[in-house]
Amino acid sequence: QQPVQSPQAVILREGEDAVINCSSSKALYSVHWYRQKHGEAPVFLMILLKGGEQKGHEKISASFNEKKQQSSLYLTASQLSYSGTYFCGSNSGGSNYKLTFGKGTLLTVNP
Amino acid sequence: EAQVTQNPRYLITVTGKKLTVTCSQNMNHEYMSWYRQDPGLGLRQIYYSMNVEVTDKGDVPEGYKVSRKEKRNFPLILESPSPNQTSLYFCASSLEGAVLNEQFFGPGTRLTVL
């Protein structure tokens, strides 16, 4: 079952902040965040693991609430280059190596 | 240059004509995966492979086959394509299981089935 992302779309002016949320109906072992620019392949941003470990780019911040089965991606002081579609992917752990992505959040940053 | 390559990049075919989309990575990654992307549906995993000769179904495996005979290659096979398989397909690879590591995506293959 796909994780649910919100909002579906957001429009910002350069310098504004945004939060993208990802929630799952299943217990989560890891949450992944990717950004895809129009006409390009998705690019890795961050992985958050159960227990608090994070792997990713230093300028990106995110949180992972295991109890609520939610993750949030924080985009601060947005730049034009932040525009794109953001996807969260979830995995429930154990012997399951499937990664299920949400439908995406379209972020548009205007000058 | 470390990369994931896919071929072809664009393909128009007809219903029922078997086709193969190739995927190759040069990073010695163990984990490889196929996704399809459709408007409004996000990325959906078709199949994945943990290593050579080890494959498993993703969320939407119907109508697709895969094989992993070599570590670097992970072809996607459509035995009898149908119009509902018209989509943008991405291959991806990661060092080990995708749940623990960054995935590197190929450039995508846009498939149209008439």
Image (tube, helix red, strand yellow):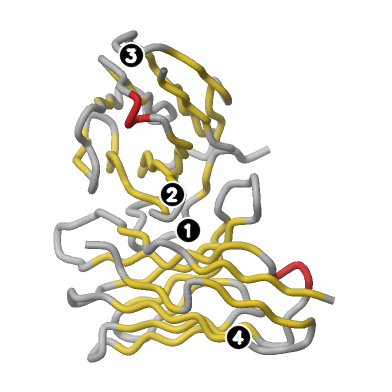
Q: Three-letter amino acid code at disc 2? A: Ser
Quarter of the image with the C terminus of chain B is top left
Disc 3 or disc 2, which is closer to the eye? 3
Disc 4 or disc 3, which is closer to the eye? 3
**Separation of marks 4 and 3 at Cα, in angstroms:** 44 Å
Q: Is residue A38 left or right of residue A90?
A: right
Pointers 2 and 1 in contact (C-beta within 8 Å) = yes
> Which mark identifies residue B15?
3
Tag 1's secondary structure?
loop
**Separation of marks 3 and 2 at Cα, in angstroms:** 33 Å
Tag 4's secondary structure?
strand
> Which mark identifies residue B102?
1
Which residue is drawn at the image coordinates 37% and 64% (left, top)?
Answer: A102
Q: Classify residue B50 by image quadrant.
A: top left
Pointers 2 and 4 in contact (C-beta within 8 Å) = no
Q: How many marks?
A: 4
Q: Name the residue under label 2.
A: B94
Q: Mark 4 points at which residue?
A: A18
Residue farthest to the left?
Answer: A95
**Separation of marks 4 and 1 at Cα, in angstroms:** 23 Å
Mark 4 nearby-residue class (10 Å; few <14, some 14–19, many ≥20): some
Q: Classify residue B32 by image quadrant.
A: top left
Question: Are tags 4 and 1 found on a single chain?
Answer: no
Which percent across, then down, holds residue A45? 55, 67
First in sequence: mark 3 vs mark 2: 3
Q: In this view, does B19 lie above or below A89?
A: above
Mark 1 nearby-residue class (10 Å; few <14, some 14–19, many ≥20): many
